[in-house]
Each structure stands twice: as structure tokens, then as C-alpha cells.
Image: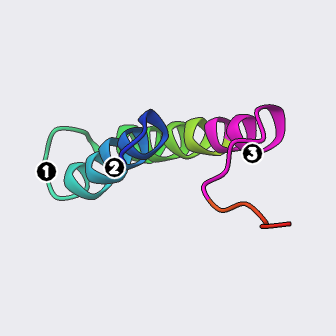
Amino acid sequence: MMTTFHIIHVVVGAWLAFINYTRMLDPSTLAWNNIILGIVVAVYNAYYLFAKGNVDVKNKS
């Protein structure tokens, strides 16, 4: 089942892969785009992992 968590990763990953092969952004803007999106993904993952404890694989006890 695709959750919002997975959809965000697919969209951001596709954007990062696609934007590098277009001329939509100049090189300095492209670098800032990648840095900012990397930070957004890191914060989003940290929130889900540490604050919500929402992970796909859980230990079976």
C-alpha cells in the first residue's frame, strides 16, 4: 500500500532525477534546489522515524 510517506519520496526522487537533465534551472539555482530538497527529505524522514515512530518494518516480538 502506497502511503503519503512513499508518494512524497517518489515525487521528490523523480524531481531530483528529472531537473538535472533540463535547462529549467541555472547551475547555481540547481545546486540550491538539490540542497533544499535534500534537507526537506532528511527532516521529513527524521520526523516520521523519531517523532511518530512510523516505520514500515517493525520487530515481531
Nearer the N terminus, badge 3 or badge 2? 2
Residue displayed at 16% across by 38% down: 24
What amino acid is found at the position of numbered circle 2 in the picture? Val
Q: Is residue 34 left or right of residue 44?
A: left
Disc 1: CA contacts within 10 A as few (<14), some (14-19) or many (>=20)? few
Nearer the N terminus, badge 3 or badge 1? 1
Secondary structure type for disc 1: loop
Q: Which mark is residue 49?
A: 3
Residue found farthest to the front: 61
Which of the two residues, 5 or 9, is positioned nearer the viewer here?
A: 5
Are the residues tagged 2 and 1 within 8 Å (C-beta)? Answer: no
Image: 19 above or below 61? above
Q: Is residue 43 left or right of residue 2?
A: right
What amino acid is found at the position of numbered circle 3 in the picture? Leu
Residue indicated by mark 1: 22
Count up the numbered dots. 3
Residue indicated by mark 2: 10
The answer for how far apart the CA atoms under marks 3 and 1 are is: 33 Å
Segment colored magenta: 43-56
Front of the two marks 3 and 1: 3
Disc 3: CA contacts within 10 A as few (<14), some (14-19) or many (>=20)? few
Residue displayed at 24% across by 39% down: 25
